[in-house]
Image: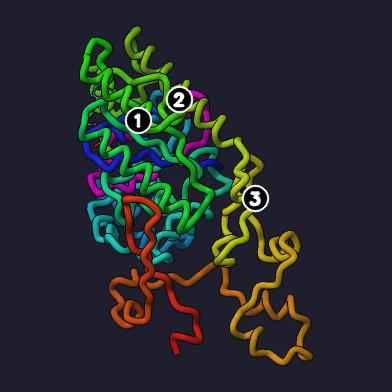
Amino acid sequence: MHVLSVSSLKGGVGKTTVALGLASAAFAQGLKTLVVDLDPQCDATTGLGAVGEFKTTVASVLKNPKHNVVSASIVSSTWGKVGGGSVDVMVGSPKSIHHDTPHPTLRQTWKLEEALHLVETIYDLVIIDTPPSINALTRTAWVASDRVLVVTEPGIFSVVAADRAIRALEEVRMAITKRVRPLGILINRHRPASKEQDFRVQELNEMFPGLLIPNYLEERAHLQQTQGAARPIHTWPGEGAVEIANFFTELLARAFVAFEEPNEEVTAEKPKEKRRFFRRHKRGSKRPEILTIETAIEQLGEIVETTESQSADVSAEPEISTSIAAMPSIETDWTEPSWQDDELAAKQQEVSTNTGSWNFKLEIEKPEEEKN
Ligand SMILES: Nc1ncnc2c1ncn2[C@@H]1O[C@H](COP(=O)(O)OP(=O)(O)O)[C@@H](O)[C@H]1O
Ligand SMILES: [Mg+2]
């Protein structure tokens, strides 16, 4: 299973359009695909024909990423009526806005990863449609992703937003997980004859050498029509639609090439926080590539230190088994979001990361012994 976020820190540039275009390409290829609608506007959910009252949504998942909640939040899209593919959606909710805090704890940023870990063997591809900000929801999406596609328009404000997005992604990479990498910057609504646009494209090329995706998506009415009809562009009639469909097929192929590129930083990384490392940190093409605690200890040749094993009498139990027993369970019992828990928040230590002009704060939970 591979995970791709489609992001932009600016609204209306085409995130949802691109996410659904990619989902349509995956649909046409018969890939088992899940679209996660993290945007409180829920446009991806609507575009996939999932309309109605949903009790369990992505907001419930962010609160409690347990198996029953995750499966109840996922429904089939109506695309199945017009073709043989399979696209499901983890339904969006306006309530997810409550999870979009500007200063999420580390634990919050891993919640979607917790959830996706449970569907690792079910899907080939997960596409996450993110809201237009760098608050908790987008970071939560990036932490769960292998690649991030930044969508922009060739206008001055969008160029600035793309710059911020790439910097923010680098911040997340440095502070939380090296697994996630940019797929590139995609220019949407390109008009070949515009001088101003040519200038901005040139500017983006200079700012991000190698990151600009060489094919641009042009302004096309078909895109809006297929969205209105909640249909995949790959099933829409006409030559214009075929052209756009081919564009997304190529873009998806580019994503899959990128997924297969080895991530040397992750391979070389000595995890700072080992518990996180045991999750899908090393997810790859061979699925499911989940490191169990036992194999991780074997591979790393390291013993996971915990409060209990540190204080235990060395002559008592063999060290490894003590450590495994003392490790927090992978099936962590998540509780209410901790920003609703003032007592816990008070115990948390704030760490500011600043590796560029963009900076945000991370709250790191203190080790157990400091809490008491
Ligand atoms: N290349 C395009 N051609 C025509 N319409 C587009 C194109 N890209 C986006 N749109 C339209 O612009 C509007 C905003 O796009 P959307 O994908 O919802 O942006 P975002 O998700 O970034 O807010 C939608 O109505 C969409 O149909
Ligand atoms: Mg959108």
CA gap, disc 3 to disc 1?
Answer: 31 Å
Badge 1, how many Cα within 10 Å: few under 14, some, many 20+?
many
The numbered mark at residue 288 is: none
Place of residue 67 in the rendered image (x, y in percent of width and height, measured from the top left): 48, 60
Per the rendered image, the range of residues in magenta is: 24-51
Asked if the magenta segment contains residue 33, the reply would be yes
Residue at image position (28%, 55%) is 96
Q: Ligand 1 is located in which of the four quadrants? A: top left
Q: Name the residue nearer the viewer: 184 or 75.
A: 184
Is residue 57 something one can see in this rendering? no
Is residue 139 something one can see in this rendering? yes
Taking 197 as reference, is 344 above or below it? below
Q: Nearer the viewer, mark 3 or mark 2?
A: 3
Secondary element at image label 2 = helix
CA gap, disc 1 to disc 2?
Answer: 10 Å
Q: Amino acid at mark 2?
A: Leu
Residue at image position (43%, 74%) is 365
Counting residues from the start of the chain, the first of labels 3 and 2 encountered is: 2
Q: Which residue is mark 3?
A: 267
